[in-house]
Amino acid sequence: MLRRSLLEHHRVSDLAGDSRAIRRVRDQILQVAPSEACVLLRGEPGTGRARAARSIHAASARASGPFVTLYCAAMPDAEVETQLFGLRRADGGTLFLDEPGHLGWVGQATVLAVARGGTASEHAHGASNVRLLASTAAPLESAVSSGAFRQDLFEQLATVTLRIPPLRERKNDLPVLTALFVERCAREYVRRVDRVSDRAMDMLMHYEWPGNVGELRRAIERAVVLTSGSVIHHHHLPAVVQDAGVADTAGQVGLSEALDVYEKDLLLDALRRSRGVRSEAARRLLTSERVLGYRLRKHGIDPRQFRAAG
């Protein structure tokens, strides 16, 4: 039951997909969630570390309790203890520390007290009952070596460590994630966008995504806003994504070839949408059936192959 619930949750999350890398993460979440151990989630920005933390909480015995996030990078050290006391509403739930490496010594001491089941001023505030999760893209070991981060706090936070893989290591998940974000953004912006063209998907697959899932989400959001039809084409994508697709051809494609690729892409999209009905496809492309027929013969496209689709 728990596994089925978690899988349903991931179908609408940044951790969606069926690659070996992301399935391993989901299995690890199921393993650590029932415990009370501190978990340190490691990975590049945009990989979905916060989503993984929420998934651990959702699959734990504390699921009905609160999930409270403390953004350490945006908080002056002097405010950390005050903020933690203000987060007493996290009792019975989960406290998620985002980038604890930004904490100063006072903040680190306060967090360590909470991690060990208390607070820095137990005599005034009482013991806390929270499960502690943390997330970082920084090499905390280096901060420990340089003396900027407490060894004992690092060991406490890293009781269990989970690595969230970058998107370039799970490229097979791109079609699933793209479809998810298209659906979500189309609903948010009230657009009738329902798919990505083959050429656009090819460019998405060739790009390395240094910003990971977060960058993909923003790229699809941009494309949904820019397109006036039901299909996202390659020219709706950010320039860096388009450039990656062009670079893959080693600059050997000239203007004529590029236009042919674009034309074929439009023809295939129109036929899919019209289920192979030529008159409907011509109407969608604002042309005549005669011209459409010529273009189809030029590209060797048989409309009949689309009549059983959809």
Image (spheres, helix red, strand yellow):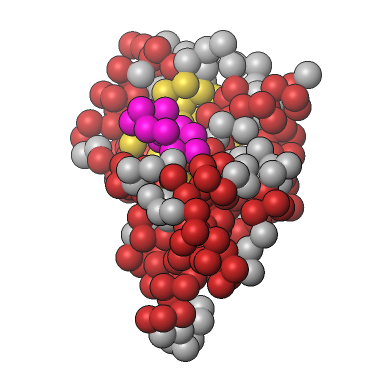
| Magenta stretch holds residue 90 | no
Question: Magenta span covers which residues?
Answer: 183-197
Residue 287 rendering spot, x and y as whole percentages: 40, 54
Q: Is residue 137 left or right of residue 87?
A: right
Q: Is residue 147 placed above or below 118 in the rendered structure? A: below
Please give the name of the residue rendered at 51% of the width and 42% of the height, measured from the top-left corner. 280
Q: Nearer the viewer, residue 172 or 76?
A: 172
Between 28 and 252, the residue placed more toward the observer is 252
Q: Quadrant of residue 262?
A: bottom left
Residue 80 visible in the picture: yes
Residue 81 is situated, as x and y percent measured from the top left of the image, at 30, 28
Res. 108 image quadrant:
top left
Q: Quadrant of the C terminus?
A: top right
Q: Is residue 222 left or right of residue 259?
A: left
Residue at the image position 60 percent from the left and 22 percent from the top: 58
Q: Quadrant of the N terminus?
A: top right
Report the residue at 35% width, 19% height from top: 87
Front residue of 265/145: it is: 265
